[in-house]
Amino acid sequence: MKSFETIGSGALFALRVITDAFRAPFELFYVYLEVADQGWRSLPLILSSGLALGLVMTLHTRTQLIKFGASAWIPAIQSLSLPSKLAGMELDKD
């Protein structure tokens, strides 16, 4: 019975969060401050991991593409394969 109460209170909390998200007053200035603060603090981590991931992916695909004469396709293939690699990292988190 305790688990049903926990699930119910969690569902009521989620419902209250959703309804309050669309109710005035909107504190957009504070949302902007929080996003800007967290964004600037994580920028070095994002840049360094993006650089490392891009270098590794380029090194893995460059030799094969040059062998087949498709070196002009390296940027296009990298931009298409990056989201799939990042999605795989997110799914492997479990």
Image (cartoon, rainbow, N blue to C red):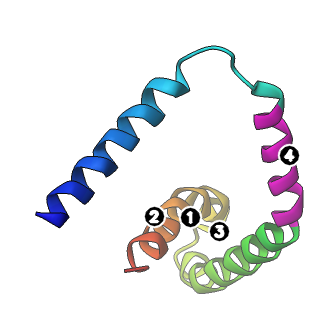
Within 10 angstroms of label 1, few (less than 14), some, or many (20 or more) residues? Answer: some
**Residue 13 rendering spot, x and y as whole percentages:** 39, 42
Which amino acid type is marked by label 4?
A: Ala
Which amino acid type is marked by label 2?
A: Ser
Which mark, by number, is residue 84?
2
Q: Earlier in the sequence, mark 4 or mark 1?
A: 4
Are the residues tagged 1 and 2 within 8 Å (C-beta)?
A: yes
Kindly report which numbered mark, 4 or 1, lies closer to the viewer in this rendering. 4
Q: Spatial distance from mark 1 to mark 2, Cα to Cα? A: 5 Å
Q: Is residue 54 magenta?
A: no
Pointer 4 residue: 36
Within 10 angstroms of label 4, few (less than 14), some, or many (20 or more) residues? Answer: few
**Magenta residues, dominant SS class:** helix
Magenta range? 30-43
Q: Residue sitting at 56 percent across and 75 percent down?
A: 65
Q: Spatial distance from mark 3 to mark 4, Cα to Cα? A: 38 Å
Q: Spatial distance from mark 1 to mark 3, Cα to Cα? A: 17 Å
Q: Residue sitting at 67 percent across and 60 percent down?
A: 75
Which amino acid type is marked by label 3?
A: Ser
Asked if 88 appears above or below 22 in the picture, the reply is below
Pointer 3 residue: 71
Q: Residue sitting at 58 percent across and 85 percent down?
A: 60
Q: Secondary structure at mark 4?
A: helix
